[in-house]
Amino acid sequence: QVQLVESGGGLVQFGGSLRLSCAASGSIFSINAMAWYQQAPGKQRELVASITSGGSTRYLDSVKGRFTISMDNAKNTVYLQMDSLKPEDTAVYYCYAQISFGTPHEYQYWGQGTQVTVSS
């Protein structure tokens, strides 16, 4: 069984920084990609940033230049460094992982979510 455990959310002022962490645990053969999604009240969950095991990254346009995703393959952990935070970044942030177990099939896992609140 695979679990994703997030940490690092909280309350921060406009222009501040936070670093989210998400550690995958369990019988993991290979993590192919990890990502962070955000879901604001009344809105759909959307991709904020993703990273493959090879290091390729993608970002939501509104966070480019402010957020940085990174992954420590040895620790099965993904990070999201969030700088120059704005009130519109306020949301629950969810960790996501695509994991395989020695076959071509990929399984998707989600963390429980961590609240990020940016005050103006």
Image (spheres, helix red, strand yellow):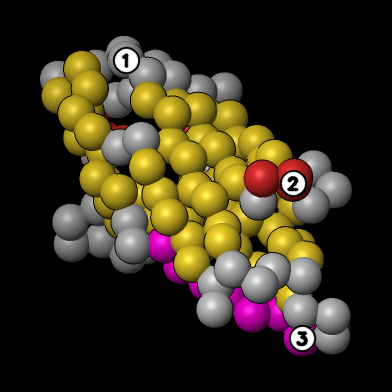
In the visual, does 50 lie left or right of 63? right
Q: Quadrant of residue 111?
A: bottom left
Which residue bears the numbered disc 2?
73
Q: Is residue 62 visible?
A: no
* Kind of residue indicated by mark 2: Asn
Q: Does the magenta stretch include residue 108?
A: yes
Q: Quadrant of the N terminus?
A: bottom right
* Residue drawn at x 75%, y 52% as measured from the top left: 52
Separation of residues labelled 2 and 3 (CA atoms): 20 Å
Name above or below for residue 19 compared with residue 56.
above
Q: How crowded is mark 1: few (under 14 residues within 10 Å), some or many (20 or more)?
A: some
* Residue drawn at x 15%, y 24% as measured from the top left: 119
Name above or below for residue 120 compared with residue 26.
above
In the visual, does 56 lie left or right of 65? right
- Observer-side mark, 1 or 2, equals 2
- Observer-side mark, 2 or 3, equals 2
Residue 16 image label: 1
* Kind of residue indicated by mark 3: His
Separation of residues labelled 1 and 2 (CA atoms): 28 Å
Residue 48 image label: none
Give SS at disc 3: loop
Which residue bears the numbered disc 3?
105
Give SS at disc 1: loop
Q: In which quarter of the image is the C terminus?
A: top left
Q: Give whichever of discs 1 and 3 has the lower sequence position.
A: 1
In the visual, does 27 lie left or right of 16? right
Q: Please name whichever residue, 102 or 10, is drawn nearer the observer in this view of the structure.
A: 102
